[in-house]
Amino acid sequence: MSGKSFLTHSRHVHIAFAVSAILCIFFATGSAQKISLTLQDAPLTILKSSSTTRKINGIPTGTPGLIELRIKWHVMTFIPNTFNILKVELMHGTRVLATNECYSIHAVPNPRCIVFTRVDQNEASAAGDWKLRITNNTGHDVNGFNIRKESTDLNPLVPSIVTTFEPDCSVRNLSVSEFEVATNGTVRGVILGIPNRAGAVQIRAKWHTDVLTPNIFNPLSVSILRDGTLVTADYGHSIHSDNRDKIDIRFTVAPLLNGSSSWAVEVNNRYLKIKQFGIEKGSDSNPFVPQFRSTFTPACS
C-alpha cells in the first residue's frame, strides 16, 4: 500500500469523543495564571470545642499544581487583640495532605495560617473532594472564617487575601519501550506520560529495517489508542528518513471525569522487518536519528 493511497484513511484521523465539549471549555479557559478558590458556605462560624469540614471550590480535576492557602477569622470576644489558634487540615477525599495549627493571617502572634501544598499528578488524578477540616479547641467561638477576605469583612487589619491554585503547565516527555515488528505483523506498545488532563499530544517516531543495505526506509501504519479505542492514525516514515511523509501525529486530549486512561501505540508493518521502534531517540546510537522527543503539553501552557 502506498503512502498516498493510505491517506484516504486520513493523515491524523480524529475520532470524536463525547467529552470533546469539555475539552473546548478547558482550552477556552485554560491559563497559566493562578485560579482563585472559594470555601463552601464561607464565612463560617466555628464554635469552641467543635470541628467542621467544608469543600474547597475551584481546584481542577486531574491537574497538578500548587495550592496556596491564606486563612483569616475573628475571635468572638469584646477583649481587643485577642487571637486564638485553630487546627486546619487540608484534605483530598479522606486523605489529610497538610495540617497546621496557626493564627489568623492578621494576628499579632505566629505562626499565621499560610499553607503551601504541592499536588502531584497521582494526587491530582485521585478521586474525592478538596476540603478543609477546621477544629477549634480553644475557649472562644470564632466567626468570619474564610480563605479569602470577603467584602463584608470590614476589619482594616485583615489584608486583602485570596487562596489560589497555580496549575503545573510544564511540558511532559512521553516514552514507550522500543520493540520490533515482523513483516506483516502488528505490535502494540504502552505509552507512558500522558496524564488525565486537557492538553495536546505530539508523537513522532523512529525505527530501522533489519537489513544491511543503507538508506532502506520502511513506511509504517501507526495508530494511537486510548483504552483500546482508536484516537488517530498516520502512515509514514521514520523521523530520519529522506522521505517527506514522516510520522508526526498531533491531537488534543480531554480529561475523563472519573479515573484515568491507558494509552498505546499500535504499529502495523507490511514490508521488511523493523527494529528499535520508538517515540524518542533515547539510546539509539544511529547518528542519522536526530535528538527528538514525543510530548504532552498541558492546556494551560
Image: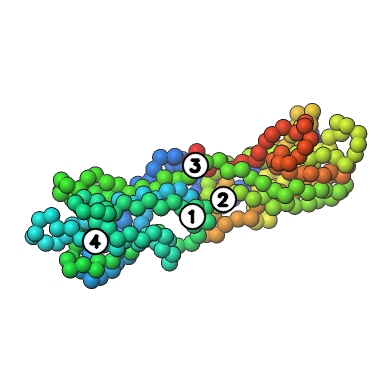
Label 2 secondary element: loop
Label 1 secondary element: helix
Residue corresponding to mark 3: 169
Q: Are marks 2 and 1 in contact (CB under 8 Å)?
A: yes
The answer to whether residue 25 of the structure is visible from this angle is no
Give above or below for 218 relative to 188: above
Name the residue rendered at 61%, 49% in the picture. 193
Residue corresponding to mark 1: 124
Residue corresponding to mark 2: 195
Does label 4 or label 3 sit earlier along the sequence? 4
Report the Cα–Cα distance between label 4 and label 2.
39 Å
Of the 4 image quadrants, the one containing the N terminus is: top right
Label 4 secondary element: loop
Q: What residue type is labelled 4?
A: Ile
Does label 4 or label 2 sit earlier along the sequence? 4
Tell me if mark 2 has few (under 14), some (14-19) or many (20+) residues whose alpha carbon lies within 10 angstroms of its own. many
Does label 4 or label 1 sit earlier along the sequence? 4
